[in-house]
Image: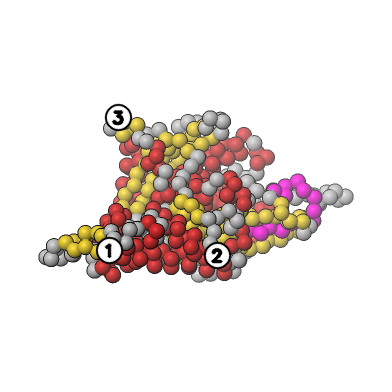
Amino acid sequence: MMDSNDIVVGLDIGTANVTAVIGEYDTDRGGEPVLKVVGYGDVPSEGIRNGIIINKEAASGCIVQAVEDAVNMSSRDVEEVVCGISGEHVKGMNSIGVVRVDSRRRGEKPEITEQSKQEAMRSAGAIPEVPDRETFFVMPIEYKVNNQGGIKNPIHMYGNRLEVQAHIITASTSAMRNLKNCIDRSEYGIQNMIPITLADCKSVLIPEEEKAGVMIIDIGGGTTEVGVQMNGATYFTGVVPIGGKYVTGDIAAVLKLSMDIAEKIKVNRGACHESLVDAKETIEMPVTSGSFGDRNISRLTVCEIAKARMWEIFSKVKRAVEDAKAMQYVNSGIVLTGGGALLPGASEVAEEVFKIPVRIGNPVGFTVDIEKDGKKIDGEIFANPRFAGAIGLAQLGLDMKIRGQMAKKRPDMGMSSPDDMPADVGDGLFKKMGKWAWNKTKNFVKDF
């Protein structure tokens, strides 16, 4: 289906780390296509705060370093990346689009075509323009034909009225341009730009969860990204402007420590649920000045500080999802990803807040073939929620390349390049986005 030399790169640009994963086409035991990870790079972030580029030179340096580390490990050449979009500036909303379907010939019944489907999507995307915001992702939830709902793909159905409920994701225009410019400075092209919650869903969810309805919570360094999916559709995306670094900051502030020492305590001895801590345990902590030697503090005290902030994060997430009336779609539970999910007790605190099952989400559905210093790297290194975004981005990039190959062989699949778009695609909301945004959306639209 694909040349084995086709390379995909997932690039997760976070507040705490920039992570790049290089993969290529492989098959599982059943012959189904899967991502084979052949290299990765993971470096601390600089010039990035809460998903926003605040120093292009520093951020570009991190991107180059992460990708080059992956390139050196894999011995592959990289030309483009699939970049994750995250941060407080990313917002999601649901919208409805309706179009009339006319018969192509007199006397014939009106039949839904690919053009009808795309017109309905454009109608759903025709939301009021807001300064410094642009739509960069549009995904169908369901279609209705003559008011009959629950339809995933209306093509070739008969009816004179087509309605689509779609989920639209918008982002700050300036933030997107700064991110794109930052990657351009790194001399890599952009295969696609994708909301990080979609990448998380791709890499960590199992089919039963996704079908029944699930919430994914990605606890990053500066922000917490949230998504709700059910039966192949996204019903909610949102962002809470608090992440793991706020837990570190609280520990540092309360215990009068530097951020570096507080981070080490959180990572090495931290927890956020009292059931995991012995009240008699203590932690030796050097005073920041170093002039008074070491001092001991109860590990339970550190746990209480961390729990208060984690409780706040999950409470804000719950409030946002409830306000959007999206909790009704969360039937199978919650999956936690991101570096913040590694804090022991995170799932226990989330269960107390939401009163439903919670698990930690490690990436699945890929193989690993990496050598370092002449030795095979154990694929278990990626069984870590911190890699969910980068691996999911690479998996989605592979899916897009496979669909692109299939579209070339099967023209009936619909538009396969920006040049195939209708001439009026620039009307209304899409005028300022043009071919760039539509190219980001159309591959996902085809799946429904």
Of discs 2 and 3, which sits in the foreground?
Answer: 2
- Earlier sequence position, callout 2 versus callout 1: 1
Q: Which mark is residue 298?
A: 1
Quote the CA–CA distance across marks 2 and 1: 35 Å
Cβ–Cβ under 8 Å for marks 2 and 3: no
The residue beneath circle 2 is 321
Residue 224: x percent and y percent? 44, 61
Tell me: 106 left or right of 298. right
Camera-near label (1 vs 3) is 1
Q: Nearer the viewer, residue 292 or 98?
A: 292
Q: How is the image coloured?
A: secondary structure
Measured Cα–Cα span from mark 2 to mark 3: 48 Å
Height in image: 79 above or below 125? above
Residue type at tag 1: Ser
Instruction: Kindly identify the amino acid type of the residue bearing the numbered disc 2.
Output: Val
- For the record, the magenta segment spans 153-167
Q: Residue at x 47, y 60 (%)?
A: 350
Q: Secondary structure at mark 3?
A: loop
The residue that appears at 58% across and 40% down in the rendered structure is 403
Q: Is residue 222 visible?
A: no
In magenta segment, residue 163? yes
Near-viewer residue (116 or 327): 327
Counting from the top left corner in percent of width and height, residue 414 is at: 65, 44
Q: Is residue 29 left or right of residue 448?
A: left
